[in-house]
Amino acid sequence: MTSRKRIGIGVVGFGWMGQAHSRSYLRIPTLFPERTYDPELVIISDNVQERVDDAVASFGFREGCTDWDEVIHHDDVDVVSICAPNMLHEPLAIAAAEAGKHVFCEKPVGGTPEQTVRIEAAARAAGIITGVGYNYRWAPLVQYAKQLIDSGELGEISNYRGRFFSMYGSDPMGLLSWRFMLDEAGHGVSSDILSHSIDLAHMLVGPIDKVVGTGHTFIPERPLPKAGGTHYDRGQPGDPTGSVENEDYFGAMVVFENGARGVFESSRSIVGPESQCAFEVYGTKGALRWNLETMNQLDLFLVDSPARGYTRVYGGERYPYHGNFVPGDANAIGYEDLKTIEDFEFLSSVAAGRRHVPGFAEAIDYVSVQQALLTSWKSERWESVTRLAPR
């Protein structure tokens, strides 16, 4: 029997992402027989005692607490998975790094570019392995798209279109939760969902050289949250309101270092697209397009194909990771399967003692673009992308 390394997991935050990652750690042994490690759910922390109790009773965590410091300094924890609200990421990640724990952090690593820079610097100084939740990289057909681009099947890339449109903030009666507050979430869609679009472009096409961008807040006031409410609760007309402090929308044009041109848009207040993280890539020999809403299909156009026009490609076991979940072709996988692939890859890097991609270095790649976009929004000019570093 092959000897496997034990990796002790501590999770901070047991909302949607904390639960999704916890399920992923439990699923890894059932899906990846080639793994070199076995994850163990050691300890969970959340500020709601009922969630802690559920994590222990239903997910099998050995211990639970409401003080995240217990997770950071637990002797049996090798990896800290940070799934707390954005503005808690900095103290959590830095404390974990200083304690010598490897850190996986949901995006955005920092709610602001400055926070991300400080977090990455602390992790680099500690010599730990880091990961960031750019999970759409791991979709099997996104991996296939990268193979096509890297092999030259599309020729020289000339144009890229990326977008992330989501309706999660489209209801004006949606409560003024932490996501809309600068001191709790950081910036708006430029910290939140635009990061996915630009990270995918970095992976598929390469670094960005210069940008011009603009943002806007379409719903400037929202009902104040009620005690015990959640992000998904609604207020009523006449309820007291407060001001939204970060942006609902961001749009940009960019020039990549390789000369390709790109266009990006991101909105949380748009009506229509439910969760449209999508991209289109255009080259001299072909083009392709992919959309999270239909994540198990990709449209591919090849100039030399006898059947001129886009061909629908369905996901299947011949593409990376898909066969770990279902065999055959056109048998769909889902969102949390991407989180499982993400966690499998990160823990594989930890077990091997190697740098993980995407890690905090890739988070710096994004916030360097984000800072240039925020500067451009104010200056109303093209701005060069300069890699951010501690001051």
Image (cartoon, rainbow, N blue to C red):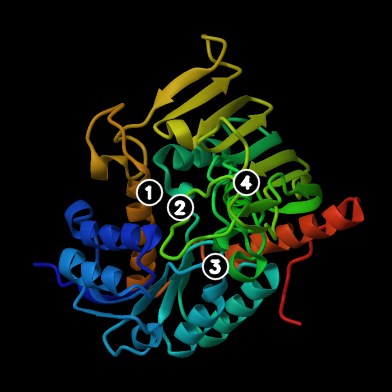
Of badges 3 and 4, the one in the foreground is 3
Dot 2 corresponds to which residue?
135
- Lower position in the chain sequence, tag 3 or tag 1: 3
Where 281 sits versus 210, above or below?
above
103 to 272, vertically: above or below: below
Residue under the image location 27 percent in, 70 percent down: 50
- To which residue does mark 4 refer? 201
Residue bearing the label numbered 3: 86
Q: Residue 140 location in percent, x, y?
A: 40, 41
Q: Nearer the viewer, residue 99 or 127?
A: 99
Q: What is the C-alpha distance between the residues marked 4 and 1?
A: 18 Å
Q: N-terminal of the two: label 4 or label 1? A: 4
Residue at (43%, 37%) from the top-left corner? 141
Q: Quadrant of the C terminus?
A: bottom right
Q: CA distance from mark 2 to mark 4?
A: 14 Å
Going from the N terminus, do you reach mark 3 or mark 2 first?
3
**Residue 218: horizontal and vertical position, in percent?**
71, 44
Q: How many marks?
A: 4
Taking 108 as reference, is 63 left or right?
left
Task: Reply above or below: 106 against 308.
Answer: below
Question: Tag 4 or tag 3, which sits nearer the N-term?
Answer: 3
Q: Amino acid at mark 2?
A: Asn
Residue drawn at (74%, 46%), measured in percent from left and top? 258
Q: At 56% from the left edge and 28% from the top edge, which residue is drawn?
A: 288
Badges 3 and 2: C-beta atoms under 8 Å apart? no
Residue 344, visible in the rendered structure: no
Label 3 to label 4, Cα distance in Å?
23 Å
Position in image of residue 118 (x %, y %): 64, 79
